[in-house]
Amino acid sequence: MNRLFVLAAAAAGSLLVMVAQVSPDFRGVIIDGNRPTIAIPDLRGTGAAQTYMSTFNQTLTADVEGSGLVKVAPKTMLWPFVPQQPSDFQTPQAPPQAPRGKRGEIVQQQNGGGHWMADWAGPPVSAKYLAFGYTAEQNGVYVLYGWLYDVASAQGSNPQAIAKRYLANTVNEAGARDLAHQFAADIIAAFGGKSIFGTHIYFVSNRTGHKEIWVMDPDGKNQRQITRYNSITIEPSVSPDATKIAFTSYAKGNPGIFVFSVDPLRDLRFYNQSASVNSQPSFTPDGTHIVYSSSAGGCCGIFIAGVDGSGFRRISSGSWIDVEPKVNPKTGADIVLTSGRSGTAQIYRMNMDGADVERLSDGTGEATNAAWHPGGQLIAYAWTRGYAQGNFNIFVMDVASKQYTQLTHGAGRNEHPNWAPDGVHLVFDSTRLGKSQIYTMLADGTGVQALTNLGSNERPVWGK
């Protein structure tokens, strides 16, 4: 079956070793290789708080390391003594320096075994920053006292970058994760980044025996089912303010579009025009309209309608198959889509009125699943790059120059990339371990993390 027809029918979703001769300039997106090192020793807690510190420490380290902004020093290189508060540091009688022997040779440098602040900046840790603190239970509240110090430039200056008390309502694993996320968010912000926690990933899972929409936290925690149609329910999309989700479902026979509010979860009643297929909804940046693919008037074209389905009109023209529309989130002025107008599926861009159509992919292989970066200059997409059908990988392209770079390499079928709100992380599905599962990675292709493992999971989208 023609892949585009499958996409148009909303029944199924969907690169190998070629890299562009000239890679795009991803300043602000691809992570700089010269990242400072931060030491994050395991924090301790008092009383009942200590019970959940393993969860806290794992979460804190994973959050900070996953930001892509810093390098985390290996815990095996840290000092046995770990300060819990600033008063635990000791001041050496003389500045720690490498003394010289009688013949002028450098002898082993003295240290305070972690008690001196300078110990953390020198070998074996060699960190520029140190995160430390402790937790406690106070009147049934989980409390964290956290500090971030610039230990490399601490001599003669104020090393303190963060000194803050954090609170969680429950003294349990959920509370421990909450405290860790809060502290990590401040650490990430200190390096100019933004935490992805508090955001959500929506995806399709068949773990109940039917394809339904699910949602989870960015680390894969708190996975929960959204729809319960006992049918085929796929292709989620999230409104810019994260208050609504749209998706395609076969619950009423032919594939149609549904729009739900998120909190509370309820059907907002989208009107589907008369057609055998209405599918692949995506919100406009202002959240007032939805673009989608429909077979009305012939399969398949790009339409736009209000969030309730009213005022629908066709944007694209021609008898070819046009699917997977996404509006530029920064400008709201142009759409990327997948089209078969030149033969196999390729990525195109056009104005919101359907004018100035141009092909972005080079015409080789199959290119699908384009998703805009929040900045509106880049897209991520899946591409076979001229290789055997089914061998998709994730690429990122600068739309203006059409220069691209490859992020995944020969690890199963990798599709449906979608950007995190921070523009630094991507979520995608992959068959690298057999069944399709959801993964995240940094925008340079590093830091791949698996989020799901139950059933088959696909088509992730990231909402605020």
Image (cartoon, helix red, strand yellow):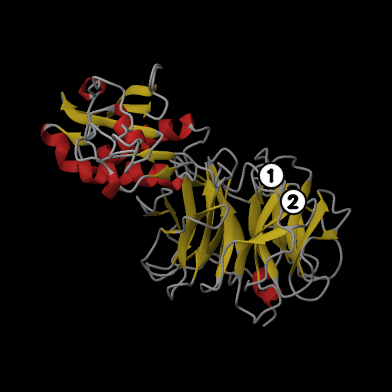
Q: Residue furthest right?
A: 356
Residue 459 showing in the rendered view: no
| Position in image of residue 190 (x %, y %) | 47, 29
Q: Residue furthest left?
A: 47
As drawn, the label of residue 157 is none
Camera-side residue of 307 and 358:
358
Q: Nearer the viewer, residue 417 or 33?
A: 33
Q: Secondary structure at mark 1?
A: loop
The amino acid on which the numbered mark 1 sits, given as a three-letter code, is Thr
Q: Which mark is residue 284?
A: 1
Of the pair 423 and 372, the residue shown nearer to us: 423
Asked if 295 appears above or below 449 in the picture, the reply is below
- Relative placement, left or right, of 20 versus 237 is right
- Compared to residue 434, the image places residue 404 above or below, namely above
Q: Is residue 190 left or right of residue 133?
A: right
What is the three-letter code of the residue carrying label 2? Ile
Distance Cα–Cα, label 1 vs label 2: 9 Å
- Give the mark nearest the N terminus, 1 or 2: 1
**Residue contact at pointers 1 and 2, CB within 8 angstroms:** yes
The residue tagged 2 is: 304
**In this view, 124 is above or below 212:** above
Which residue does the image show at 58% across and 66% down from the upper left? 415
Could one spot residue 147 in this view of the protein? Answer: yes
